[in-house]
Amino acid sequence: MAWSVYLVRCSDDSLYTGIATDVSRRFAEHQAQGAKTARYLRGRAPLALVFHCPAGDRSAALKLEYRIKQLPKADKLRLVAGELQLL
């Protein structure tokens, strides 16, 4: 199963990083603000999916997610803009 890493921009201009096998389904769950929404994203709507990329298997996706989470916000914004490559 192919996993992907994604970034979501919240209404407070923060960035949320996550992994999923189906990014569009997972983003729809976040937008619904229901039981399957990540706790961090609750109350931070409207949301915008600003970045996603394939990451291979689950282990590789978790490692890439961790690398992205360790980046300063300026580098995350460069990643979103396509100015920074992690792969």
Image (tube, helix red, strand yellow):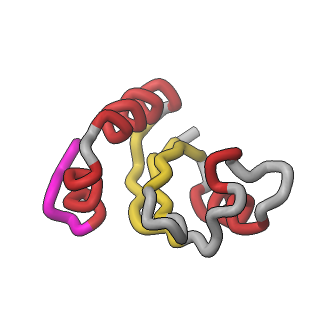
Q: Quadrant of the N terminus?
A: top right
User: 71 and 82: which one is in front?
Assistant: 71
Q: Is residue 36 above or below residue 57?
A: below
84 in magenta: yes
Snapshot quadrant of residue 26: bottom right
Q: Which residue is at a point 23% across and 68% down the rendered structure image? A: 81
Q: Residue at x 47, y 47 (%)?
A: 17
Which of 72/59 is in front?
A: 72
Question: Is 43 situated left or right of 49 in this image?
Answer: right
Residue 3 drawn at (x, y percent):
51, 42
Q: Residue at x 20, y 60 (%)?
A: 78
Quarter occupied by residue 77 = bottom left
- Left of 23 or right of it: where is 42? right
Boundaries of the magenta span: 81-87
As drawn, is 39 to the left or to the right of 67?
Answer: right
Q: Is residue 12 above or below residue 62?
A: below
Q: Is residue 84 left or right of residue 33?
A: left
Decide which of 61, 17 is in the foreground and name it.
Answer: 17
Residue 2 location (% of width, % of height): 52, 43
Locate the C terminus by quadrant. Answer: top left
Q: Is residue 6 magenta?
A: no
As drawn, the residue found furthest toward the front would be: 12
Where residue 12 appears, as percent x and y from the top left, is 50, 66
Horizontal and vertical percent position of residue 22? 62, 54
